[in-house]
Image: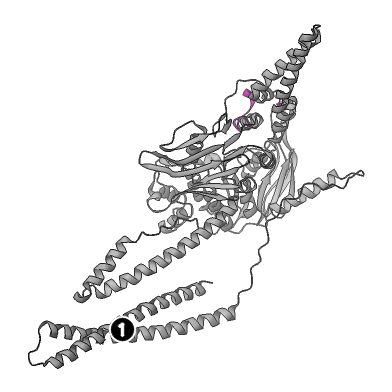
Amino acid sequence: MLIASEVSKAYSTRTLFSGLSLVVTAGDRIALIGANGSGKTTLMDILAGDILSDTGSVSRQRNLSIGYLRQEPAAFTGKPLLQEVLDARSDELALIDQVNDTREALATERDSAKQAALLKDLGRLEVALEATGGGDREHEAKTILSGLGFKQSDFARPMREFSGGWVMRAGLARLLFKRPDLLLLDEPTNHLDLDANLWFEKYLASFRGAVIVTSHDRAFLNQVATRVLAIEEDGPVLMKGNYDEYLVARESMLKVKQAAAARQEREIQRQMRFVERFRAKARKASQVQSRLKQLEKIERIELPRATRRVRYSFPQPTRSGAEVISLTNVSKSYGDNAVYQGMNLVLSRGDRVALVGPNGAGKTTMLRMLAGVLPLDEGRRRLGHNVVAAYYAQHILELLNPANTVIGELQQAAPMESEQNLRTTLGGFLFSGDDVRKSISVLSGGEKARVALAKLLLQPSNLLLMDEPTNHLDIASREILADALDDYHGTICLITHDRTLIRQVANKIIEIDSGRPTVYPGDYDAYLYTKQSEAQSASAAPSDDGTAADATPDAPPIRRRSGRPHNAEEMRRRALSKEARILAIRIAEIDGLLSDREARISELEAMFSQPDRSLSPAEFATAGEEYRVLKEEAGSLWDEWERLSLEAETIDGELAALKAI
């Protein structure tokens, strides 16, 4: 279908990727991943034929149709939504017109020969139309639009009436309806709510063509991907499996590489010990130079950078009352659209709430009312005792001072924090070294979002309200945000379409539907199980044929921490300590023996260079034999010293690991 061979692309002095090769066949579901700015969209553009690579080649199957969903909104003519989608398969429209024209001609034709010819043409056209699925084209278009969250009343609305997010969905619907051989999808889930996401996953699972998709939604990639193409710092990597399987494989590869690097480092240190020990000894000069040349030839193993779990040291907020915030008999309308009427809601201390529900259900309105930035039409908002609220929304990025540096922005928000603690926090949000001195004005959207999040979490709040905090964040940044929220000491209420974040953070789900909040205690998987059970109960009927409903999504396996064998560990630690002491004593003995022998060897070498004429030939022969024996003994002692030193290092490493447990 498509073959990319040794493709590379660079801008100015920065190479995005090089040596990238890929074979795409029908049925492939390839997740294209990498940090922001790594070149994912550029690679999509190359595969689509929009731009050329610097080196390498891309060959495409003849008549291959490619559908490319870009991050910018698609262009529409202003027709009604349904018609815009139907127009995507204009070839079918032409076939339908030909079929209708042929049928009309056949109805009025009286000549038998011409009737036969028309019947033959009609059969050929109907076969061609059936091959395109044209007979059910309107039903198919409506199914796709409904799956992506559009209502039936939206189908006849002109495209100019839809907001940006819905225009993006319409573009996706048009692309899916077109049914290309290869789908290139650049962040398709950015504007989809949870329900639309689930439908989209099922659609892609049954799609007959190939899919290459970028997304920061880890759960989506796990459901969709069968292969992962990762653009990493040390080169592109292609692996089988979904995103989590890629992480496991990458971790295994990293461990192998770390072990190889550790062995290499031990060998380098062993050689350097020899060099340092004998650098000043003339008789060892040739061996020292030989080992230095060997060290120069060693190709160092470079370990890829890995995102590690960071423990955050956020300010300890004051303890709030048991009831953190409440909305009582609240009503809110936008013109004639009543979003909430007589609604009641209470958040308690320790709640970590995820607000879920379809787009337009009122999640953001709810969060803004909780934050106090949206006035109520009726009812009351009440903060609990000692509650200090902090609110994160996309407009916060616009409030960053472009003249500030990254660390300067945090210093203004938390003047009492030390620079070291601010640097540590920023390191957790992927700002290290000189990055903290970057000006806010030159940061990308994702970098600004990370600064805003770090700034917010450094303020001593005990109620955190967040509206889509994962927007602009790549997968690594989302994991860091989840880690930070794990370490946050207060109550949380957030809106996010990132199911991985919900699973890690939330202990309560509140579903908003038609202006009614429904509280589901427990985590996200418990919520899914409850919803599935409710759906099965609702669909049960007396004429039940016994067929099973769709299986509930598998909950993540419960990992039980095995008990630590403290006694066995202590015994092992003592045995290693004893062995380390024995080795240290023997190494010290060898050092003494080497010093004695090397001193005598030096005396003999001096004598041989300026021979004492009083010595007889027999005495010279005896001295020569002594020199030979001492050299052999010194060589053996040195070999033993190196071997025991390596053993001692290994034991020290194991002891350090045991102490860390």
Residue 166 magenta-highlighted = yes
- Most extreme residue toward the left, as rendered? 613
In the rendering, at what x and y percent does residue 575 appear? 50, 83
What residue is shown at x 28% (from left), y 83% (from top)? Answer: 632
What residue is shown at x 35% (from left), y 67% (from top)? Answer: 268
What residue is shown at x 65% (from left), y 63% (from top)? Answer: 559
- Most extreme residue toward the right, as rendered? 542
**Which image quadrant for residue 495?**
top right
Name the residue that disc number 1 marks. Answer: 591
Per the image, label 1 sits on a secondary structure element best described as: helix
Quadrant including the N terminus:
top right
Q: Is residue 434 left or right of residue 548?
A: left
Q: From this viewpoint, is residue 416 visible?
A: no
Residue 96 magenta-highlighted = no
Quadrant including the C terminus:
bottom right
Q: Is residue 468 left or right of residue 127?
A: left
Q: Is residue 126 above or below residue 488?
A: above
- Most extreme residue toward the front, as rendered? 113
Which residue range is magenta in the image?
A: 153-167
